[in-house]
């Protein structure tokens, strides 16, 4: 004998006049409605959790953007500070050059400048400006003087093997140390260029000159006028490009020329 399906009736009685209504559900239908309700509740809970996670991620993203903006601001301030430090160092070098403060590297133990005298009496008699040396200095074979009057406008970098000294066109260029002229002629990049050999290991180079006053083989003394400042070759304005080479490798002339 087949088991009869059981039902549940729901009677709806209105408060006002009207016909009451009766809804009848089988137990099977109620079970399916319960399952459906549970599924809907679970789906709603998952949606709430998912949206909550999305909102949390959005908040974290905004926080990261804010922190990134703060870091960029701090980085900008550090960059400005570094630029200011570089500017002050360049100004210090410029003032040192203008005031005539110069030295040799510490390992050479050059005596402190106490008195200054003209170096080359021949050019002094001719009325040309002269470089000056310490009267007590005995190391004239080391480039211990500025090769011209001016200020250092560009220092040595991996792509720039010397220093640029901004100066007036036509100003004298002096030999930075005793030596022999090993090159005096035209260079496609440095224009009128001079190279002086001071020893088997040490040499100097002077570029962008307007006019050369020495030739290959000439013996020169520290402070002798060897050229005039110019802007020949690949140059944007009057200046002297000055290099110091030790064992064939470029070294920073600042270490020889300017007190830090």
Image (spheres, helix red, strand yellow):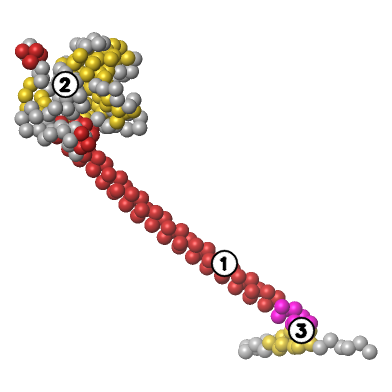
Q: Position of residue 191 (x, y in %)?
A: 29, 15
Indicate which disc residue 220 carries.
Answer: none
Callout 1–callout 2 Cβ contact below 8 Å:
no
**In the image, is 134 to the left or to the right of 256?**
left
Q: Look at mark 2 in the image and give the residue it sits on.
A: 222
**In the image, is 202 to the left or to the right of 109?**
right
Q: Is residue 28 magenta?
A: yes
Callout 3–callout 2 Cβ contact below 8 Å:
no
Which residue is at a point 68% across and 87% down the rendered structure image? 12
Q: Position of residue 121 (x, y in %)?
A: 7, 15
Q: Is any part of residue 99 visible from this angle? A: no
Q: Look at mark 1 in the image and give the residue it sits on.
A: 50
- Mark 3 vs mark 1: which is more N-terminal? 3
Q: Position of residue 126 (x, y in %)?
A: 7, 11
- Secondary structure, magenta segment, majority class: helix
Q: Is any part of residue 5 visible from this angle? A: yes
- What segment carries the magenta color? 27-35
Quadrant (top left, top right, bottom left, bottom right) of the C terminus: top left
């Amino acid at each position: 004998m087949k088991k009869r399906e059981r039902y549940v009736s729901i009677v709806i009685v209105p408060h006002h006049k009207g016909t009451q209504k009766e809804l009848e559900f089988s137990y099977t239908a109620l079970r399916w409605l319960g399952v459906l309700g549970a599924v809907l509740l679970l789906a709603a809970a998952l949606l709430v959790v998912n949206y909550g996670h999305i909102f949390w991620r959005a908040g974290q993203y905004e926080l990261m953007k804010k922190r990134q903006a703060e870091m960029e601001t701090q980085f900008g301030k550090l960059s400005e500070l570094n630029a200011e430090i570089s500017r002050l160092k360049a100004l210090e070098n410029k003032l040192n050059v203008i005031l005539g403060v110069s030295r040799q590297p510490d390992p050479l133990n050059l005596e402190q400048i106490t008195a200054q005298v003209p170096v080359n009496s021949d050019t002094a008699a001719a009325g040309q400006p002269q470089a000056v040396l310490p009267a007590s200095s005995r190391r004239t074979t080391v480039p211990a003087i500025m090769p011209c009057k001016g200020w250092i406008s560009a220092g040595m970098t991996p792509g720039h093997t010397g220093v640029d000294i901004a100066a007036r066109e036509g100003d004298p260029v002096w030999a930075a140390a005793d030596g022999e002229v090993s090159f005096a002629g035209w260079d496609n990049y440095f224009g009128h260029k001079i190279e002086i050999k001071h020893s088997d290991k040490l040499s100097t180079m002077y570029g962008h000159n307007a006019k050369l006053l020495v030739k290959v083989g000439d013996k020169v003394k520290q402070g002798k006028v060897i050229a005039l400042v110019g802007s020949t070759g690949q140059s944007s304005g009057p200046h002297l490009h000055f290099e110091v080479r030790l064992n064939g490798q470029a070294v920073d002339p600042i270490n020889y020329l300017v007190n830090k």
